[in-house]
Image: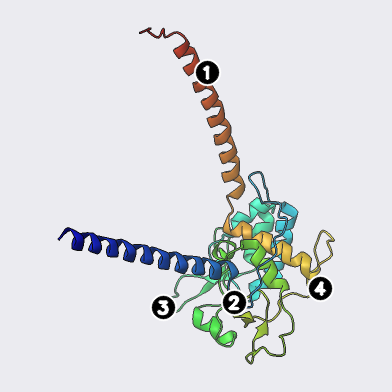
Amino acid sequence: MDMSYSQTKKESATGFIKKLLFAAVILISFGSVTARGNTGVDTPPKAAWSFNGPFGVFKRDQLQRGFQVYKEVCAVCHGLDLVRYDKLAALGFSEAEIKAIAGAHDVPGPLNEDGEPTTVKATPGNAFANPYPNANAARAANNGAFPPDLSLMAKARAHGPDYIRALLTGYEAAPDDFGLMDGMYYNRYFSGNQIAMPPPLADNQVEYSDGTPATVEQMSNDVSAFLTWTAEPELEIRRNLGVKVMIFLSFFTLLMYCLMRRTWRKIKHSKK
């Protein structure tokens, strides 16, 4: 009876170890696939962003250039549904400039007396106007592909701004043995290497007001930084608060340590 129980217990332990090993293999394989991404998709190269690191900050001139690229290029197809025009004040735009930017767009207004929808000029308190009235219209205008909203794109994609920058500069001719579908474009960094969006940028496509040369590389950097700001507009405030908290906690820890030493110094240990 004891032998049978011992053998059963040993078999159970062996089975449990096998299950653990199998689970470990699955997890390692999944981690490898996740880190590598889809077959043939390159990992976006890392860029030296000014907002990286605990003390990183946005460059206002770069954000303004990025907004210009979005407004003149990306906004034709992509919306910023979670961003209001008045938030552009954080980029250095004046109140008059923001009113002018908002007023150039129409947004849904109240129903008229016949119950039909109307449009009104956007105000600074409105969210960015969407280029399409609904998802069906967006798909119809893009051969069935739906242009995603860009408000949180830098947070929604792995590698954030590096991915956006890489995607915009990753268009190239498809390899000879690659089965590129009709109406699609080859991109090194897009899932499956096929993307419905044509290359959106070309050199000198916009004219920067500060005189910066509008190369594809420059515009990709600028709009990637701008979309990082739309996804994390409070990034600088949060980091500044974090630094202040860490300084306070360091000072508080040192104070408590000194207090502890002073307190225990006065206590006489009894000798046995």
Along the horizontal axis of the image, is 191 left or right of 267? right
Of the residues tagged 2 and 4, which is closer to the observer? 2
In the picture, the disc for residue 258 is 1
Specify the amino acid type for callout 4. Answer: Asp
What residue is at 44 percent from the left and 64 percent from the top?
Answer: 24
Residue 39's place in the image compared with 265, above or below, is below
Q: Position of residue 77 (x, y in %)?
A: 62, 76
Along the horizontal axis of the image, is 126 left or right of 46? left
Q: Position of residue 62 (x, y in %)?
A: 74, 57
> In this figure, which residue is indicated by the disc labeled 2?
191
Of the residues tagged 2 and 3, which is closer to the observer? 2
Earlier in the chain: of badge 2 and badge 3, it is: 3
Earlier in the chain: of badge 3 and badge 1, it is: 3
What residue is at 60 percent from the left and 73 percent from the top?
Answer: 78
Specify the amino acid type for callout 2. Answer: Ser
Disc 4 crowd rating (10 Å Cα; few below 14, some 14-19, many 20+) is few
Whether label 4 touches label 3, CB < 8 Å: no
> In this figure, which residue is indicated by the disc labeled 3?
115
Earlier in the chain: of badge 1 and badge 4, it is: 4
> In this figure, which residue is indicated by the disc labeled 4?
203
Residue 94's place in the image compared with 190, above or below, is above
Residue 112's place in the image compared with 128, above or below, is below
Of the residues tagged 3 and 1, which is closer to the observer? 1
Label 4 residue SS: loop
Q: Assign the N terminus to one quadrant of the image.
A: bottom left
Earlier in the chain: of badge 2 and badge 1, it is: 2
Residue 157 appears in the figure: yes
Specify the amino acid type for callout 1. Answer: Cys
In the picture, the disc for residue 69 is none
Earlier in the chain: of badge 2 and badge 4, it is: 2
Residue 95's place in the image compared with 103, above or below, is above
